[in-house]
Every structure is written in C-alpha cells, then in structure tokens.
Amino acid sequence: MKYDIRVMKSQQYMLEEIFEKNLLFLIPFYIFSHETRFEEYEKDKTKLVSLQEEYELIKNRLEELLHQGAISEYTRCTIIDMSNKVLEHIAAKYNSVKEGVKAVMGGKVLEYEAKTIKREGIREGRREGIEQGENRLSLLIAKLMESNRSQDVIRAAQDKQYRNKLYEEYLIDNEK
C-alpha cells in the first residue's frame, strides 16, 4: 500500500510570512515565540506595549482580510478566540501579559461576536428549515389532491408517522 502524507516543515514563521503564505491557522501559536520573554514583559511596561502593538497589528490585518472578503467573520473570531485560549494557558502566571494582549485581541467583545454569529446561523438555519418543510408539505398535499386523496391530506396534517409514510410513498425527500 502507498499513502500520500502531506507534511509541513516545522519552522518558526515570522508574522509577515504567516500572512503572506496564508497560514492564518498558525496565528494562535505565534504567541509561543514570545513565551520565553513573558517575564521581561511582565516587569517592563514598554516591552509589554511593543507586544501589544504586535497583537494590534495581527488584529488589524485580520480585520483587513475580513473587509477584503478573504476570510469570514467566523474565521476571524475563531483565530482570535484560539489565540486568547493559547495565551490563557501559556501566560497563566503573567497577568499583565495575559490581560494586555487580551485587551488588544478583544476577549469579551470576541465572546459576544461569536455568540452573535452563532445566533445568526441558528436563525438562518431555522428559516431555511421552515421553508424546506413548507415546500415538502406543499408538494405532498398537491400530489395527494391530484390523486383524489383529500382524506389523506387531513390525516397527514395530524399524524406525523402517516405523513412520513406518504413522503416515502410519493418519493418526496427531505431536501426539497
């Protein structure tokens, strides 16, 4: 047997390379490149500011890609959320670093945006589901009426199992 296995060379990507090569999934792990200097950032506020500026740049680049249509709001939020999660774990004992970067990346705002995206997706899915169900039932009713089976229309409206049996009988699938 032969298997093709895609391999990505493990290397330290610079921030510019991540964006140039569209390796956005590496952004959450980019913070590891700063991990050895967390203690420095914690003690020296000017160094912490430079770290915050770098994360401000990341946030702005992601927003730019969003506005260009290169990524979705969901992708942007996911990258930022994952970055915050990585940061939470590796900077747990460095409060200034953790809070400083989270302030730039939008911890609480992001949670709200992600919930908004989820709610919008649920609403859209419900609308599509209702429309699909109505179309399916309309098609069944039309076929029953064409077959002079008006009593089956009434029963189908009241009995889900019978309605499903009729969908099968008339070959009406769930996708229409």
Image (cartoon, grey):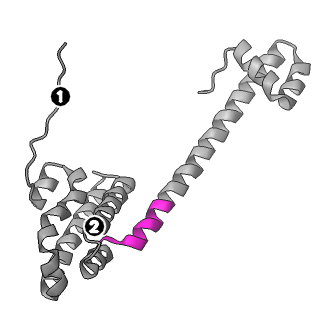
Within 10 Å of disc 1 (Cα), the crowding (few <14, some 14-19, many 20+) is few
Does the magenta portion include 110? yes
Q: State whether residue 83 is above or below residue 107.
A: above
Give the image location of residue 73, x and y in percent: 38, 57
Give the image location of residue 135, x and y in percent: 68, 31
Amino acid tagged 1: Ile
At a point 27% along the width and 76% down the height, the residue shown is: 93
Q: Which residue is mark 2?
A: 87
Residue occupying the far right of the picture: 151
Q: Earlier in the sequence, mark 2 or mark 1?
A: 1
Q: Which mark is residue 103?
A: none
Q: Which residue is mark 1?
A: 5
Q: Number of callouts in the render?
A: 2
In front here: 162 or 73? 162
Give the image location of residue 91, x and y in percent: 25, 71
Magenta segment boundaries in residue numbering:
105-115
In front here: 2 or 132? 2
Amino acid tagged 2: Leu
Residue occupying the far front of the picture: 93
Predominant SS along the magenta part: helix
Give the image location of residue 61, x and y in percent: 22, 63
Residue 42 picture quarter:
bottom left
Q: State whether residue 60 is above or below residue 170.
A: below
Image quarter of the C terminus:
top right
Badge 2 marks a residue whose secondary structure is helix
At a point 74% along the width and 29% down the height, the residue shown is: 137
Q: State whether residue 49 is above or below residue 114.
A: below
Image quarter of the N terminus:
top left
Q: CA distance from mark 2 to mark 1?
A: 31 Å
At a point 62% along the width and 45% down the height, the residue shown is: 127
Within 10 Å of disc 2 (Cα), the crowding (few <14, some 14-19, many 20+) is many
